[in-house]
Image (cartoon, grey):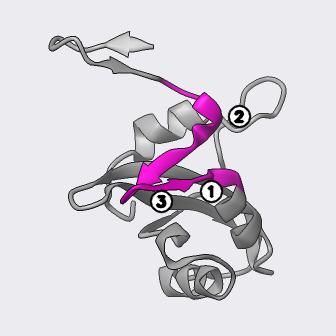
């Protein structure tokens, strides 16, 4: 946890990675499972990023399979077929790898630090 200069307390990392978008709970693992079903996706991680209207919104960080190409629209359309609309990623960034700790777990805190903005990069 951390406390800002105004006294607000923030849960940092974990809290099971769930975030709230427009009053709806979003569990990244559910979105990750759907995206990972796409045949051109090798790995994926989903984080919540700030959104002016909804508070937070999903951002997918996708590692394409070697030799495959993907677009944001393909990922979003795939999600649209399998998830409620508010769970589909608003932002998609393509990365070469996901940061991991020594035991192989994806470092979501590192992803939020490096990709926590709403841009698609």
Towards the viewer: 96 or 15: 15
Q: Earlier in the sequence, mark 1 or mark 3?
A: 3
84 relative to 7 in the view: left or right: right
Q: Residue shown at 63%/76% (left/top)?
A: 83
Mark 1 highlights which residue? 96
Query: What is the crowding at mark 3: few (fewer than 14 residues within 10 Å), some, or many (at least 20)?
Result: many
Q: Which mark is residue 100?
A: 2
Q: Separation of disc 2 and disc 1 at Cα?
A: 13 Å
Q: Secondary structure at mark 3?
A: strand
58 relative to 16 in the view: left or right: left
Q: Which mark is residue 59?
A: 3
Q: Separation of disc 3 and disc 2 at Cα?
A: 18 Å
Q: Position of residue 1 (x, y in %)?
A: 45, 14
The quarter of the displayed image where residue 105 is located: top right
Q: Position of residue 33 (x, y in %)?
A: 76, 63
Q: Residue shown at 53%/31% (left/top)?
A: 109
């Amino acid at each position: 946890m951390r406390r800002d200069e105004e006294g607000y307390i923030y849960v940092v990392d974990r809290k099971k990675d769930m975030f709230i978008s427009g009053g709806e709970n979003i569990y990244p693992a559910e979105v990750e499972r759907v995206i990972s079903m796409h045949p051109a996706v090798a790995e994926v991680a989903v984080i919540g990023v700030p959104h002016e209207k909804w508070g937070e919104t999903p951002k997918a960080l996708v590692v394409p399979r070697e030799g495959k190409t993907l677009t944001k629209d393909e990922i979003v359309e795939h999600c649209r077929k399998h998830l409620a609309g508010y769970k589909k990623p608003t932002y998609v960034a393509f990365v070469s790898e996901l940061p991991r700790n020594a035991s192989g777990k994806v470092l979501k805190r590192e992803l939020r630090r490096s990709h926590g903005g709403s841009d698609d990069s």
